Image (tube, rainbow, N blue to C red):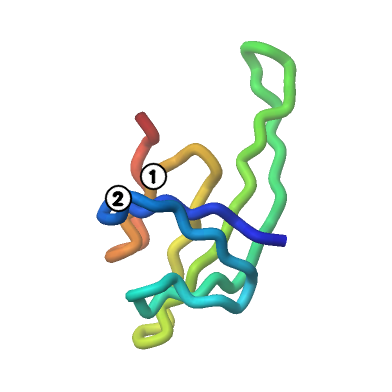
Amino acid sequence: MSFQINSMERRKSEFLKIGEIFPGTKWQVTKFEQKLRKNPKTGEDDDRSELTLTNLQTSETAVLVLGARVDATVGTPRKAN
């Protein structure tokens, strides 16, 4: 399974598999968890799946949540626009 990752600094998307390293960085794709949450307004399931990246130098992790922005330099999620 490949995962699409869009970087704020790059114009093109990267399609990576578990174990692959994001080009030009020390971040490796290490885990995927499918997560569905019930939306109280619609009653439908919202996809909030998580992709975990691990910094190979520091072992720090950044969890990318579908639809949310993450500053992977510190691993802090920010709300998507």
Q: Residue at x 73, y 20 (%)?
A: 44
Taking depth in this image into account, of 23 and 44 the one nearest to the observer is: 23
Q: Name the residue type under label 2.
A: Met
Q: Residue at x 35, y 29 (%)?
A: 81
> Residue 33: where, in percent of width, then height?
68, 56
Q: Name the residue type under label 1.
A: Arg
> Residue 69: where, in percent of width, then height?
39, 44
Q: Quadrant of residue 22?
A: bottom left
Taking depth in this image into account, of 10 and 58 the one nearest to the observer is: 10
Label for residue 41? Answer: none
Picture quarter with the N terminus = bottom right
**47 left or right of 11?**
right
**11 left or right of 18?**
left
Q: Quadrant of residue 45?
A: top right
**Against 71, is 19 above or below?**
below
Determine whether the residue tagged by mark 1 lies in a helix, strand or loop: strand
Q: Residue at x 59, y 73 (%)?
A: 30
Q: Given this view, does label 1 or label 2 mark the residue nearer the observer?
A: 2
Mark 1 → mark 2, Cα distance in angstroms? 9 Å
Task: Kindly identify which residue carries mark 1.
Answer: 69
Q: Is there CB contact under 8 Å for labels 1 and 2?
A: yes
Q: Residue furthest top?
A: 41
Q: Residue furthest front?
A: 12
The residue carrying pointer 2 sits among few (fewer than 14), some (14 to 19) or many (20 or more) residues within 10 Å by Cα, namely: few
Label for residue 8? Answer: 2
**37 left or right of 71?**
right
Determine whether the residue tagged by mark 2 lies in a helix, strand or loop: loop
